[in-house]
């Protein structure tokens, strides 16, 4: 089945130690999104790629970076995680013009 | 900027009953989509139903239907014959048509179906 895959599902990192979360998709969608979702809150968009074009939200901290080496993969890099970055990170994809996003299962990040 | 408000943080109903989740939104635009997403415990978020603002007819998907009141900017979700598998966080969301397709989510309603 076509899907959005996120690895790892659970990630523990130390304060200040860089961490990378990955997302892959078999849907061949050209738009990919990264959301941060803290406990019992709405997902908050960090950035998205429209094909290779990167779009950063104005309030996304500089600590968060992203890479999209090809259509199928997208990475979220947190350069120096703080305790406040502990959250669920959701990847989503869509086909431009469809207005429907497909979500991965998320990566739960713990910062110790 | 548009906002989405869900005024019911938590709800619970007995299995097989009908439940309605509320959502209001604020926008000055005329062309947009509204969505209800379901996020079960420890599982991925999935789209339940969507409504195009230019359509007057309310969307329906099996046991799920919406009551879309464009003038009132209201978009409620009705779940009929509720099942245990409906237990989840439900998010109302909004996006502009012909925009950047970014979703604006409400704060969610945690729905529990009681056996």
Image (spheres, rainbow, N blue to C red):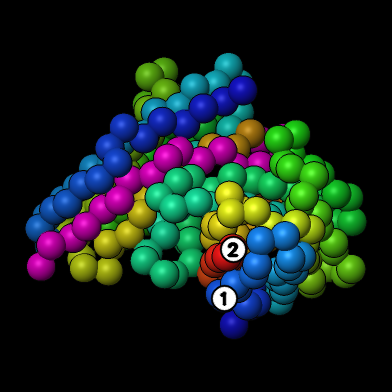
Does dot 1 land on a helix, a strand or a loop?
loop
Residue at x 48%, y 45% (from the top left corner): A42
Callout 2 environment at 10 Å: few (<14), some (14 to 19), or many (20+)?
some
**Residue B51, x across and y down, in percent:** 47, 41
As drawn, the label of residue A9 is 1
Q: Chain of mark 1?
A: A
Residue at x 59%, y 82% (from the top left corner): A1
Judged left or right of residue A78, residue B26 is left
Nearer mark to the viewer, of 1 and 2: 2
Residue A65 versus residue A109 in the image, above or below: above
Report the front residue among B107 and A32.
Answer: B107
The region drawn magenta spans: B97-115
* Residue under pointer 2: A111
Marks 1 and 2, how far apart at CA: 14 Å
Residue A43 versus residue A73 in the image, above or below: above
Task: Point out the residue furthest to the bottom here.
Answer: A1
Q: Chain of mark 2?
A: A
Judged left or right of residue A110, residue A30 is right
Whether residue B107 is in magenta: the answer is yes
**Residue B41, x across and y down, in percent:** 36, 66
Residue at x 45%, y 46% (from the top left corner): A41
**Residue B10, x across and y down, in percent:** 25, 45
Q: Which quadrant is home to the C terminus of chain B? A: bottom left
Residue at x 63%, y 77% (from the top left corner): A8
């Amino acid at each position: 089945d076509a899907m959005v895959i996120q690895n790892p599902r659970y990630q523990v990192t130390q304060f200040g130690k860089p961490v990378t979360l990955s997302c892959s998709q078999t849907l061949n969608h050209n738009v990919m999104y990264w959301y941060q979702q803290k406990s019992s809150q709405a997902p908050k968009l960090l950035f998205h790629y429209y094909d290779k074009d990167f779009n950063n939200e104005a309030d996304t901290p500089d600590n968060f970076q992203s890479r999209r080496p090809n259509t199928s993969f997208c990475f979220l890099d947190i350069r120096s995680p703080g305790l406040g970055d502990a959250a669920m990170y959701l990847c989503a994809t869509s086909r431009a013009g469809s207005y429907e996003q497909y979500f991965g299962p998320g990566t739960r990040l713990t910062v110790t | 900027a548009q906002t989405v408000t869900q005024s019911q943080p938590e709800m619970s109903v007995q299995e097989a009953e009908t439940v309605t989740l509320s959502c209001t939104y604020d926008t000055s635009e005329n062309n947009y989509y509204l969505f209800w997403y379901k996020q079960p415990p420890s599982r991925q978020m999935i789209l339940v139903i969507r409504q195009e603002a230019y359509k007057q007819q309310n969307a329906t998907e099996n046991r799920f239907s919406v009551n879309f009141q464009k003038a009132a900017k209201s978009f409620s979700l009705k779940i009929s014959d509720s099942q245990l598998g409906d237990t989840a966080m439900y998010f109302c969301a909004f996006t502009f048509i012909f925009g950047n397709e970014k979703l604006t989510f409400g704060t969610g309603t945690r729905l529990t179906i009681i056996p």
